[in-house]
Amino acid sequence: MYLNNDLNKYIKKFTTDTKTYHNSYTPLFYRINKAEDAVEFLKIMEEKPYTKVFDAINNQLQDLIKVLHPTRVFEAAALEAAIDIHLKGVARTDYGVWVYYPWIDTIVHLLDEQEFIEVRTNRNKHKITQAEQDELSKKKIGVIGLSVGQSVSLTLAMERGCGELRIADFDVLDLTNLNRIRSGVNNVNIKKTVIVAREIAEIDPFLKVTCFHDGITENNIDEFLTSNGKLDLLIDECDGIDIKILCRTKAKSYEIPVLMEASDRGTIDIERFDLEPERPILHGKIEHLDLSKVKYLKTNEDKVPYILPIAGVETLSTRMKASMLEIQQTITSWPQLASAVTYGGGITADLSRRILLDQLHVSGRFFVDMEEIICDPIDQEKEVKPPVIEKGISFDDIEASLSQATYRNNPEALVLSQHELDDIIATAQRGSSAGNNQPWKWFYQKGKLFLFHDTERSFSFANQDNIVAFVGFGLTLESIRLKAQGMNLSVDEQTFPDPSIPTLIAVLQFTSLQEIQKDPLAPFTAIRHTSRNIPKVNKPIKEQDLLELQAETSKIEGAKLYLCSDQEAIAKLAGVMGQADKLRLFTPTGHHELFNLELRWNKEHSEATGDGLDLESFELTPGEAVGMRIAKDPKVLDLLKEWKGGAGLERLSRKSALGASAIGLITMPAYTAQSFINGGKAAERVWLTANKNNISMHPMTASILHFNLLKYGTALNDDLFLKEKFGQLNDIFYQQFDQVGPEEVSVFLFRLFYAENPTTLSQRKPLAQIFKSKNN
């Protein structure tokens, strides 16, 4: 115990003594041929006898003589004689300058400034001519941010690409910085400005370095840019969005060019405000934003709308995009590598020199992507190609099919009036389908309404045996039946009337509604809507409403509705749904169908196609919206799968499911086409009943579709990783729905909750693309 206390005492003492050097970065110069300098120099040696002394002046003098006489080849004796002549009787000990570095208690004997610079920059010639070197010595460069900026600053110093370097950073060195910042563990918790200034001083003690230890603020930005003469170039390597914008706004006002290197893909931004004083900052990418709010942004979610256009999400490297989806999942911040930072320093120093020497005048964004410049040839066999989608059915195909089709003819069938037909087809047009893909074409002829499967529009990895499309047909057929009843019409429905024409799903004939009670849901066909809102508070759904939903389900023969409202079970189901939606994206087909066939990226896109899911209806946070854009790149998903990561891709579905007051599962007794159509009919009844009772509904079927693939299909057999994962999720899922019998088939999964009606509704295809009437 005594020994421990003794050790602690000395550790504390020496740590305290060492801290006196924490902010020291300015070397001291002693020219000992001057009396006062000699006294001070001797004082250091006496007070600090442990000081290390390095005297390599003879080596430097040899280099100096060779530099001064480049045409001569010196023998050893001749070289020493030339040195003696150059010294003019001055003792070698007295020649030049002794430089004391207090933070390392080291004294180094060097040539004095002009000769030191002459020798140190000699190998620059003639990549940099003497005239150019002289011109650069008059230039002032400012560097904001000293992670990437450290490499930039040191490269500039080594090349002596300026006469004054101003560096700014408020932060200290962390251990996590040492994967890319060339420094030692002894510098952890020391200010980055101090570390960089010291390193430069140890390379070139004569280079002027001005430190802004508090980083850049509104209060000191003008001083940084103009004090002791205006900067000739500003290099921005900071992380703060507010400072990126502030420094450019100020640099523009002073007509100072700005250069930024972002390390990922060697991304370079050049903004020549000196040549283009009216040029918008950041290439105009943020002109649409309110820049006055930037300094008040606190969270990453708040900053995303500003980060997104600056970073250019689509042009990030695949690994950077994949890594961004792992932030706050498996990593804490975006990655940077020493290799990229190091060559980024070289690129930036090269561009700085050319800008300052009036050899480069361009503005814009550029990429020096080593992975693209030097890479293996693309293996065409391994390259994943988009899935081939079969050609859909045309109205000409439909007419040709019907000329040979067999189906039951109802002698009591009515020929609908134009008004009646319009109402029925408008209902069909609003039908619900997976991903709003609308996999149908409708044809009306001689009092019969034919439903055909447009297979081109139901392309899906999980649509094995067309089960996804059949559910959509069931939803829509039930909606039409109810609409017809509201018009005092009864529907005679024949499904799959002619096995030789598999695309002919149903034939509908309409008769007068005779003395039977109308379905209570008939007045409500127009109110059905999907809500993806997340309620702030999960209010429990009334028991009588849940019982009503189950009662409506049972009106479809064989259909059952299971409801889960236990919050612990919902949390487990939310995990399953989140992982299922992520794993879906790990299949090339699943990824292609979501991002190329289902999602519509803005209102204009949605209106132009008339189908798909408008992202605005998802009510995403800015961060989630960026995540969707990143996940659009299939190579990102390949990486996440390889890393067994991608937890960020689960977030949206998990959050949605956690926002459920109840989760419902509709099952049917058999895995048949008719069962899935009937299951869709049951889902329509549940949906309308929920909306009638002001309960929101959100279908979330990805998990059960893949569980059906696992049980009844073969598509997952080609990927054992996905098969194993879905198998695990299957077990967790049915533990929460343990009343479901082994013979039952899951058809439709959804969440129920109370929320405001959505402000954005999905578009529908124009009637001309989905419906044709002949001889009516």
Image (cartoon, helix red, strand yellow):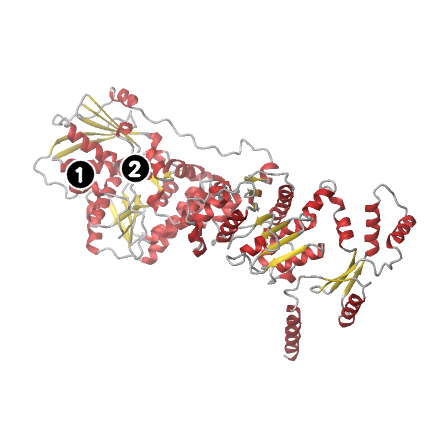
Do the residues bearing badges 2 and 1 touch, measured as CB atoms within 8 Å?
Answer: no
Quadrant where the N terminus is found in the figure: bottom right
Q: Position of residue 453 (x, y in %)?
A: 30, 30
Q: x, y percentage for residue 607?
A: 32, 35
Relative height, residue 725 to residue 9 (above, below): above
Residue 680 in the image, given as x and y percentages of width and height:
26, 40
Q: Residues within 10 Å of mark 1 (few under 14, many from 20)?
A: many
Numbered label attached to residue 763: 2
The answer to whether residue 38 is above or below residue 536 is: below
Q: Amino acid type of disc 2?
A: Gln
The residue sitting at 60% across, 36% down in the picture is 373
Instruction: Look at the numbered disc 1 and give the secondary structure of its residue.
Output: helix
Residue beneath label 1, please? Answer: 482
Residue 10 place in picture, x, y as percent:
66, 75
Q: Viewer-nearest of labels 2 and 1?
A: 2
Q: Is residue 28 visible?
A: yes
- Count of numbered circles on the image: 2
Residue at x-position 14% and y-position 34%: 490
Dividing the picture into quadrants, the one containing residue 771 is top left
**Can residue 145 be seen by looking at this rendering?**
no
Q: Residue at x 69, y 64 (%)?
A: 103
The amino acid on which the numbered mark 1 sits, given as a three-letter code, is Leu
Q: Is residue 208 left or right of residue 372?
A: right
As measured in the structure, the alpha-carbon distance from the residue carrying label 2 to the one carrying label 1 is 22 Å
From the viewer's perspective, is 305 left or right of 419? right
**What residue is shown at x 22% (from left), y 34% (from top)?**
426
Q: Earlier in the sequence, mark 2 or mark 1?
A: 1
Dot 2: what SS?
A: loop
128 on left or right of 141: right
Q: Residues within 10 Å of mark 2 (few under 14, many from 20)?
A: some
For residue 717, what is the image quadrant? top left
